[in-house]
Image: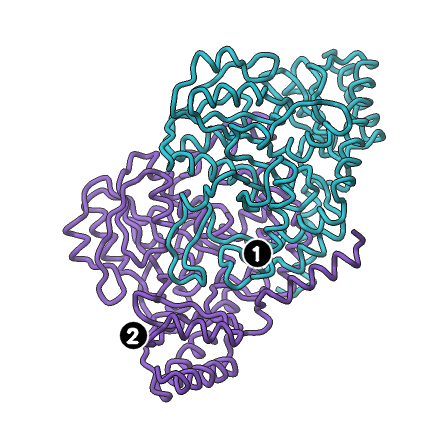
Chain colours: A cyan, B purple
Amino acid sequence: MDEKEIEDLLQKYYLKDMHYEDGKILGSMYTKPPEIALKAFFKFYQANLGNPGLYKGTVEIEREVVKFLLRLTSGKDDFFGHVVSGGTEANVIALWAAREMGYKRVLATQDAHFSIRKAANLLKLSLENVEIIKGRMSIEDLERKIKGGDIIVATAGTTPLGFIDPIEEIGKICEMHNCFLHVDAAFGGYVIPFLRELGYTNKKFGFDISAVRTITIDPHKMGMAPYPAGGIVSKENIFEKIEIEAPYLMVGKNEGLLGTRQSGSVAAAYAAQLYFGWDGYREIVKKCMENTNYLVKRAREENFEILEMPEMNIVNIKIKNVGKVKKELYARGWGISTNPKYSSLRIVVMPHVTKEIIDEFLGELKNIKKSYGL
Amino acid sequence: MDEKEIEDLLQKYYLKDMHYEDGKILGSMYTKPPEIALKAFFKFYQANLGNPGLYKGTVEIEREVVKFLLRLTSGKDDFFGHVVSGGTEANVIALWAAREMGYKRVLATQDAHFSIRKAANLLKLSLENVEIIKGRMSIEDLERKIKGGDIIVATAGTTPLGFIDPIEEIGKICEMHNCFLHVDAAFGGYVIPFLRELGYTNKKFGFDISAVRTITIDPHKMGMAPYPAGGIVSKENIFEKIEIEAPYLMVGKNEGLLGTRQSGSVAAAYAAQLYFGWDGYREIVKKCMENTNYLVKRAREENFEILEMPEMNIVNIKIKNVGKVKKELYARGWGISTNPKYSSLRIVVMPHVTKEIIDEFLGELKNIKKSYGL
């Protein structure tokens, strides 16, 4: 087939997809990256950090990104880390390394990301649920259930609600019981440090809590980098626990979960962090929180009920018949997600979710409510 | 930092990497994709098939790629499959699904890809080595070791040597013992069908062998697609064995290993297959095999020893002190890989490895041999 025909065909499929440019994707933890990140992506997309011997420059770039992840997580420069394909890979790596160190059982809430359940199944680690109180891990239930040798997964920015588990208290309990504490800050890692500077919170989630051993923190979420750019950082070298001999590679070994590691997004994550810098990311969080508060205020004015005051830029609007409303919104071009458990529409207030979009969305929601008497 | 400064900094790192454009990467199973594949990549790179509800067009594209993978593997259109991040993810998915079906032990040769060892460790499946005879799985040793409930991993195009295990015979033995046969054709899947048409071989490796249940076959290797585009195809729906509930996603579940799935490369794999078509891929294989034979002939003329006549476009040149030679070549800008076990330099004759590059390389190798008396 010639190039023109292929482009026409691709366009046909493209039009069936939803796009961030339209602003109507409200349920995703991703947003369009800045141009410079895309330039970096396209310059380095053929680098494969699965075979790092060939890509000395990209290896150095990865180290720079990891340094920034360590700054966000209150870690030290000589801690360890990798840019990986996303939060799932990062969580699997952390739990895999912990299993190799002898830890056997995972304790997490049901609001922990589904990749924790996936990792436990994959790794044949038993998994026990810790109860949730007001969307956060119950310290009392944790104290009841914890045993020596457990892996505790705390979440800094839960996927359904964007809430922060009480990680400082969890850390103290982990230390008393010699447990492994993994923090999933895939979303919150690029938000909480700035919430602190902006006065929204004083919570900690990172290596300044001494029990924390590993942290998931994804540049391709609030770090404004394109997929696939997840992150995993750790206090000790967890990667050598899971490395495998690969004699034909220049470096002779492979560490991490995947073999091939597309590295355009590693360079793009670097470009994004240079472009925004610490202060730029704070401005992004500031704007997202302003829009979050605007959404809460406007929704209440329209007599919608907010599940609980958001802790970061994720808002849940309680709705009867939430499945039906989701379908209606979807038919009208809105990429919305729901929390069936909380009977709520879940809006991630990413940078593309502007005040105009919020107004348009609430207008649509009002119409649906009226038509269906929901 | 401003965009210009960032670009300058990226360029500094870029120059430290090796690049396919230089032609001197001889040890990689990747090559520069055609322009139209890159256009497709950049058009769809923000699609995330981890959340397929938003990307109906990309889902359809993925199905078209899978159809082509099924054609290459002699499968039927209603078989199952996904485009994933690479061979490692594909192999993990196959073995994970097999474990969920009750299979417990993996039998593979030491020349199986390292991701098989990785998957066995990850999944807590015991792993037993089957002996190798002339670079291929020993049928006798397999018969000695096989037990009901085993997972047999055969390779169609081994990573070190590019050899094809005797998969038809292995299949018969698997059927006698009710075993699960997974074929890793990550590299060979886009080569062997064309070797057959070109008269190089009459070997089978795919679903036309009735025992074959799952096959790994990677577009980002000989399919000329950019990273990350691996492939996993199966006769039954292995994906529902490992799916996980993900209520906040539009589709309510997540199947596969990763959460986020960057899908630019899915569109790019599609563009590449439309661009080349069946006949175009055959021409690529034809050219690569001509260059393979040229390399063998010229190397022998220069008194280098070839390990054994290559079965596909991977050539091993026996060298004393192979580690030292590799370092020397590397210092001179050659991205070469080695098989320490076979004391050989390993050259993957990808499309960028032309006759000119081969002559230049052998000249360099002769000089090194002379200087060091190797």
The answer to whether A291 is drawn above or below residue A373 in the figure is below
Asked if residue B86 is positioned above or below residue B248 in the image, the reply reads: below
Residue A335, given in percent of the width and then of the height, sits at: 69, 32
Q: Position of residue B296 (x, y in %)?
A: 37, 80
Q: Nearer the viewer, residue B148 or B70?
A: B148
Quarter of the figure with residue A359? top right
Rendered location of residue B4, percent (x, y)? 79, 59
Tag 1 secondary structure: helix
Checking the image for residue A59, the label placed there is 1
Which amino acid does the dot numbered 1 rest on?
A: Val
Would you call the spot at circle 1 few (<14 residues within 10 Å), some (14-19), or many (20 or more)? many
Camera-side residue of A1 and B363: B363
Q: Chain of mark 2?
A: B
Q: Is residue B54 visible?
A: yes
Three-letter amino acid code at the position of disc 2: Glu
Residue picked out by circle 2: B308
Question: Up-down: is A256 above or below B156?
Answer: above
Residue occupying the point 59% across, 51% down = A63
* Circle 2/circle 1 CB separation < 8 Å: no
- With B207 as the anchor, is A187 left or right in this view? right
The answer to whether A89 is drawn above or below residue B323 in the figure is above
Marks 2/1: CA–CA distance: 35 Å
Locate the C terminus of chain B by quadrant. Answer: bottom left
Nearer to us: label 2 or label 1: 1
Q: Mark 1, chain letter?
A: A
Q: Residue at x 79, y 14 (%)?
A: A370
One can see residue B284 in this view: no
Q: Residue furthest bottom?
A: B301
Q: Secondary structure at mark 2?
A: loop
Looking at the image, which residue is at 52% across and 64% down? A54
